[in-house]
Image: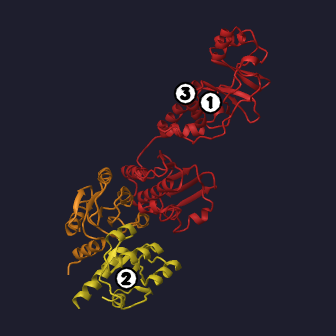
Chain colours: A yellow, B orange, C red
Amino acid sequence: MTLGTLIGACGWEAVQVPDLNAEATGAYTSDLLSDVMAHGPEGAVLITVQNHTNTVAVCTLVGAPAILVVHGREIPDDMREAAAREGIALLRTKDDQFNASLKMGRALAAGKQG
Amino acid sequence: MTMSEVAEVLQAEVLVKGDGLLRRVGHVMASDLMSDVLLVDEEDMLLLTSLASDQVLRTAQIVGAVGVVVVNGKPLPSSMVNVANDLHMTLATSRLSKYDACVAVHAARHPL
Amino acid sequence: MNAPGSQPPVVPDDRPELGETGNDPLVLLELIQRLKVRDVMTPDLVTLPRAASMQQAQELMRQKKISGVPVEENGRFFGLVSIDDIIRALVAGTIHESCGRHMTTKLVVLEDDMPLSFALRYFDRYHYGRFPVLNRDRRLVGIICQRDINRALLVELTRELQRLESASVQRGGEGAAGSLYLLREFPICKYDFENAGKAANQIKQVLQEKQFASKVIRRIAVAAYELEINLCVHSDGGVLSWQVSSGRAEVIARDAGPGIEDVEWACRDGTSTANEWIRSLGFGAGMGLVNVRRVSDEFEITSKKGSGTTVKAVIYIEGGAA
């Protein structure tokens, strides 16, 4: 499912999306970057509160196309710059990790059917 | 939905039955930051987390959670089982990822 | 043999860590930090002037059953005649010579306003039986030996015990204003992650037994937990205490350092001085003080960079919203 479709389906705030056609094959929810590095699947959107540059670095490593920052956390400038450099999309929502995961799950499931 | 039903849905292994196994789950929180867990005022919370530390259990007790499920199939330090027993906190582990666990719990609570 | 008056008494200037006596239970720890050397020493001293003979010193020791005689004149301290010095003088046949000539001058002394914990370290380190005590003006004001310390601790501990026993504990939360009294204190050690949060868990268990309103319990527990973790992660260790009386619960965290330079800044959201390792354990996304303030009815923090910090959270139990 493309990021553009996902954003439309879930209502995420598109903070910075370099490529709306980038593919998302799933999602991964974690606030522990060590855990993301160990288990984050390639092509999955990372759902997290961790709003800093390290998150971007980890996503580059595991091949995540986008980061969904939850709980309405602010995205600092240095994170934006890092994401822009790496070509990783930044999304944002007021939902918490649980609800964001549910929405993402529904959208991705619908995408697989449609 | 009770903690015991959650464990079933998540194919989780219950390590410590605690006081919460048969209690109803209210709010679900899927966080790894205990500082965030302490900000929530919900009662009867289920905590889904990737963090395998004693802190998780202690935080869970403080906020009155009904139970903790550690996801990602993480092996737990034995101290966690001891602490869970001390605090009578229901503790289970699941091989599912946190994302999949969230989706599964929700699906079980709102069957189509 | 030391030349008389040639070397002034030594006050070691490397300050040992407070409370480093390892296994002290909490009340004891507090006492040895709170009590000063002057609270414990023997102030009425038997002394001799330099001109007095070693034999006079020996007589004095025998009569008064003491093991050392300070040599001083009008408060000015010169040295100490110990039993060893007496024995040496007896063997060398100099027992009739002056104290000034044969006393020990290379001495470790204590200052009267030092905490007792310092004195204990010196006893540990130097293996002397006693230490002369000087005041700020380098006047001799007393002498302290192990027996003095034991006696003082016994007296203080008894007092403490009586205070705790006389506090009556009743069921809470039913208009029992002023009659409920609970007090507990927990030492919290820096980076003691194994136990971090344990005190707060215990506090919550007690509150549940006393059957306070659940929302009140939660607020007290959250305050205690945040403050405890704070002590563990952001300080060099300290004491977490809580008490319930007169319809209020107070949770107080006291540490001995390093102090917060800008208290207001530290109370803002998202601040943290914790390092990566601490964060990986699940701590450290802030000092938690914002949350403490959020759950408290009254919140007070006093800190000075370089010295200690005290944070106090008050939660009303009676009457008000739960």
Q: Is residue A49 above or below residue C27?
A: below
- Identify the image quadrant of the N terminus of chain B: bottom left
Left of C238 or right of it: where is B100? left
- Identify the image quadrant of the C terminus of chain B: bottom left
Q: Residue at x 63, y 16 (%)?
A: C83
- Residue C40: mark: 1
Front in this rendered view, residue C158 or C288: C288
Chain letter of the residue carrying label 3: C
Tag 2 near tag 3, CB within 8 Å: no
Mark 2 lies on residue? A65
Front in this rendered view, residue C197 or C53: C53
3 or 1: tag closer to the N-terminus: 1
Which corner quadrant of the image does residue A2 belong to? bottom left
Mark 3 lies on residue? C150
Residue C147 lies, in percent from the top left, at 57, 24
Q: Secondary structure at mark 2?
A: loop
Chain letter of the residue carrying label 2: A
Residue C306 lies, in percent from the top left, at 63, 53
